[in-house]
Amino acid sequence: MYQPQLEAMNREQLADLQLERLQATLRRIHAHNPRYVGRLNGLGADDVKSVDDLRQFPFMSKDDLRDAYPFGLTCAPKSDFVRMHMSSGTTGTPVICPHTANDVRQWGEIMARCLTAAGVGPDDVLQITPSFGLFNGGFGFHYGATTLETMIIPIGAGRTKLQLQFMKDLGTTAVAAIASYPLRLMEVAAEIGFDFHNETKLRAGIFGAEIWSEEMRQRIENVMGIQAFDIIGMTESAGVGMGIDCADRSGIHVWEDHYLVEFVDPNGADPVPDGEWGEMVITTLTREGLPLIRFRTRDISKLLSRETCACGRTSLRVERIACRNDDMLKVKGVNFYPKQVESILLRHPEVGNDYLIELDRVGGADRITLHVETENDMDAFLPAKINEELHDLIGLHAEVLLLPLGGLPRPAGKAVRVKDKREHGH
Ligand SMILES: [Zn+2]
């Protein structure tokens, strides 16, 4: 652990610390931003006697943050800001998250915890493959590794052959990436006959920003010879690093002394019980530039445990994110999400790592077409098998089209798994 006194704190002490920090956050909002106070219906630190009292506060959505572009809900003097990041992949008005110097320190601290949880320390060589820019990924890993005095290779996105060359020549032991990038690394490695096991010292991969299945994790671990960790966080929360799964693989630890977590009905406001799927709602406890009170992340997960983990950490554990609420697909009244389809496909060893779910409407009826890359695109039995497995899981049939490996386009940046050609989208 990077900070055992905090990461393994007993939960009663933790609750006291959370309350103290929540009150301080509310006082900060009241001291700096009347508009934000209005959003909270005037509620403040005096209304909070325990963290459960947070339930009387209204939710915040991404739209609230967009409407506040650029600095409408920030809670520090502009002269205190030292950098900013912006939410990625959205059209229209972006969300700006400004950081004070303390915010950058906080980010470095939580990222140092994440790296430590992944077994990365001062003697490691960390290759940072997310971009350094408005997207928070590159800098988040940079601050964490800087805090730990880990050697950094700040290569950023793309240039996959150079990435492989550096892994070999510079002795990279850990790689950070958006979750679909290992697939590019593996694909190019196969093309040029690069063997991760023999040619690199890689041990750990830390992947996030996208939703990836357990089956995908196994494939990446096998090919790259690493242990792969799932890291969570978003621009609004400070960036990557809000939590990570530990080596025990029993859920994602969320750094609860910095973030309060609730799960609520994705289509409503009611809390959902521990162990049931819900939308993750977060409240920041130590952020200054843009504190969040009950921010709806759109991420669907569930609370797995509040018990002490085998790794010794006492922070609660949540399930790996199943889907973004916005990514939920609805076909013929049935809800499902891309990760479920990924799990079915990747259980077939001959199926490649890339796939596309296409939705369109034929004769007034929705149709699902799965574009699947495989070693033998003439396989007469595979489409029927996949179709049957899909039907068993979600009760829908799909047309399964086989393509040779490499047959789908490879977009730069985040993977494209769904193409919805229906008139009204979802
Ligand atoms: Zn653990």
Image (spheres, rainbow, N blue to C red):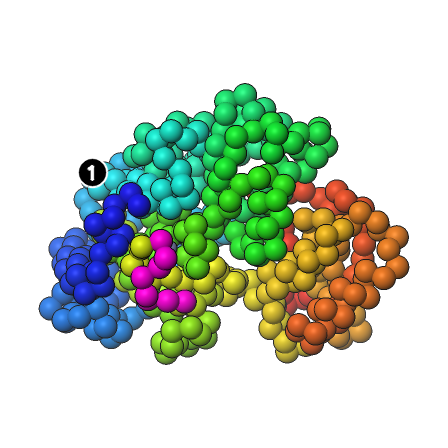
Which secondary structure type mostly characterizes the magenta part of the structure?
loop
**Image position, residue 417 (x, y; %):** 64, 54
Residue plotted at (68% across, 49% down): 354
Compare residues 153 and 1 and report the one nearer the observer. Answer: 1
Magenta region includes residue 306: yes
Compare residues 277 and 47 and report the one nearer the observer. Answer: 277
Residue plotted at (63% across, 60% down): 343
On-image quarter of the N terminus: top left
Query: Among all residues in the image, which is located at the extreme left?
Result: 46
Q: Is residue 411 above or below residue 32?
A: above
Residue 295, visible in the rendered structure: no
Q: Is residue 8 left or right of residue 94?
A: left
Query: Among all residues in the image, which is located at the extreme top?
Result: 169
Residue for badge 1: 79
**Three-letter code for the amino acid on which mark 1 is drawn:** Ser
Q: Is residue 200 above or below residue 378?
A: above
**Image position, residue 175 (x, y; %):** 49, 36
**Image position, residue 321 (x, y; %):** 48, 60
On-image quarter of the C terminus: bottom right
Residue plotted at (64% across, 38% down): 186
Q: Is residue 347 left or right of residue 145?
A: right
Look at the image and give the residue range highlighted in magenta. Answer: 304-311
Q: Give the image quadrant in which the ligand numbered 1 is located.
A: bottom left
Secondary structure beneath dot 1 equals helix
Q: Is residue 105 left or right of residue 19?
A: right
Q: Is residue 102 above or below residue 400?
A: above
Q: Is residue 220 left or right of residue 152?
A: right
